[in-house]
């Protein structure tokens, strides 16, 4: 870390040296041998985020775990500190992300089991946005999320259907758009967006996805916004 800070300090004073790129982000297990000595993160095989087909093979996206140097220091924290950052929370690297799990009972249960009020609030806030709202008061959002946290004692009786019903009452701690329409989730994986986009296109009455306006053609997300709305 000390070396990194020195190099970055030199770069800040130099007209030629702009910075450095740390080698490397993840261990290259495919190379083997001494090549596995490099990398800030390794892979854990106890939790996978997604599986997909890659040129005929089924592969998995594994979660990350920090690698440690000879002094027992987590390398990602050392690198982040040198660049002035705070790094990541390793506790949540290999658990479902409330910003990305499906908005359904499965997703709710995954976040509830983490017994974390802030993370449940992220999930509930997504439901608010999905129903055309915008959270204005964080404290009241936390109050709404609390009954769904795993250690609340009531979480077992709180379903996703109940949550949607409660948010559907348009609570005053959020603002609501009466003309809200569906848009594509920018946190969703592209591999999940594409089949849903294609399905919606097949269901359109009197219109097709070939009718997408020019201003919505610049990427697939914008095209999906048109189709979903």
Image (spheres, helix red, strand yellow):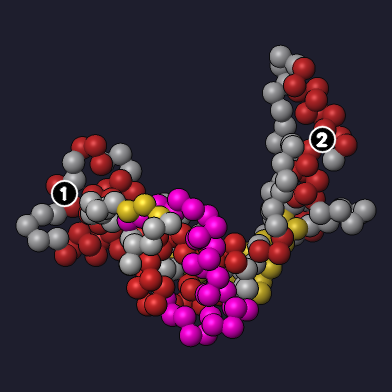
Query: Between 149 and 88, which is closer to the camera in this rendering?
Result: 149
Q: Is residue 5 magenta?
A: no
Residue 166: % across, % down: 38, 71
Q: Which mark is residue 29?
A: none
Question: Residue 139's quadrant in the figure?
Answer: bottom right
CB contact under 8 Å: marks 1 and 2: no
Say which residue appears at 88% left-offset and 37% top-offset: 2
| Label 1: few (<14), some (14–19) or many (≥20) C-alpha neighbours in 10 Å | few
Say which residue appears at 28% left-offset and 56% top-offset: 182
The secondary structure type at the circle numbered 2 is: helix
Query: Between 21 and 85, which is closer to the camera in this rendering?
Result: 85
Horizontal relation, residue 89 to residue 112: left or right: right
Horizontal relation, residue 205 to residue 83: left or right: left
Give the magenta range.
132-160
Say which residue appears at 30% left-offset and 46% top-offset: 222
In this rendering, the answer to whether 135 lies above or below 106 is above
- From the image, tell me which residue sits under label 2: 4
Mark 1 vs mark 2, CA separation in Å: 51 Å
In this view, the residue farthest toward the left is: 206
Question: Residue 172's quadrant in the figure?
Answer: bottom left
- From the image, tell me which residue sits under label 1: 210
Q: Quadrant of the C terminus?
A: bottom left
In this view, the residue farthest toward the front is: 172
Residue 119: % across, % down: 58, 63
Residue 201: % across, % down: 20, 59
| Label 2: few (<14), some (14–19) or many (≥20) C-alpha neighbours in 10 Å | some
């Amino acid at each position: 870390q000390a070396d990194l800070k020195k190099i970055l300090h030199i770069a800040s004073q130099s007209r030629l040296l702009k910075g450095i790129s740390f080698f490397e982000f993840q261990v290259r297990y495919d190379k083997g041998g001494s090549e596995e000595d490099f990398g800030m993160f390794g892979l854990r095989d106890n939790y996978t985020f997604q599986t997909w087909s890659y040129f005929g093979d089924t592969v998995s996206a594994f979660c990350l775990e920090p690698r440690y140097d000879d002094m027992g220091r987590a390398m990602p924290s050392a690198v982040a500190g040198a660049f002035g950052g705070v790094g990541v929370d390793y506790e949540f690297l290999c658990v479902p992300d409330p910003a990305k799990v499906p908005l359904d009972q499965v997703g709710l249960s995954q976040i509830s089991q983490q017994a974390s009020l802030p993370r449940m609030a992220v999930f509930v806030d997504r439901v608010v946005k999905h129903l055309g709202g915008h959270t204005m008061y964080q404290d009241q959002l936390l109050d709404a999320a609390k009954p769904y946290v795993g250690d609340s004692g009531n979480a077992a009786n709180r379903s996703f259907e109940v949550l949607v019903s409660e948010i559907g009452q348009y609570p005053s701690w959020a603002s609501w758009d009466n003309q809200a329409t569906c848009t594509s989730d920018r946190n969703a994986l592209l591999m999940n967006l594409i089949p849903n986009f294609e399905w919606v296109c097949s269901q359109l009455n009197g219109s097709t996805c070939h009718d997408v306006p020019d201003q919505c053609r610049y990427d697939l997300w914008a095209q999906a916004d048109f189709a979903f709305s």
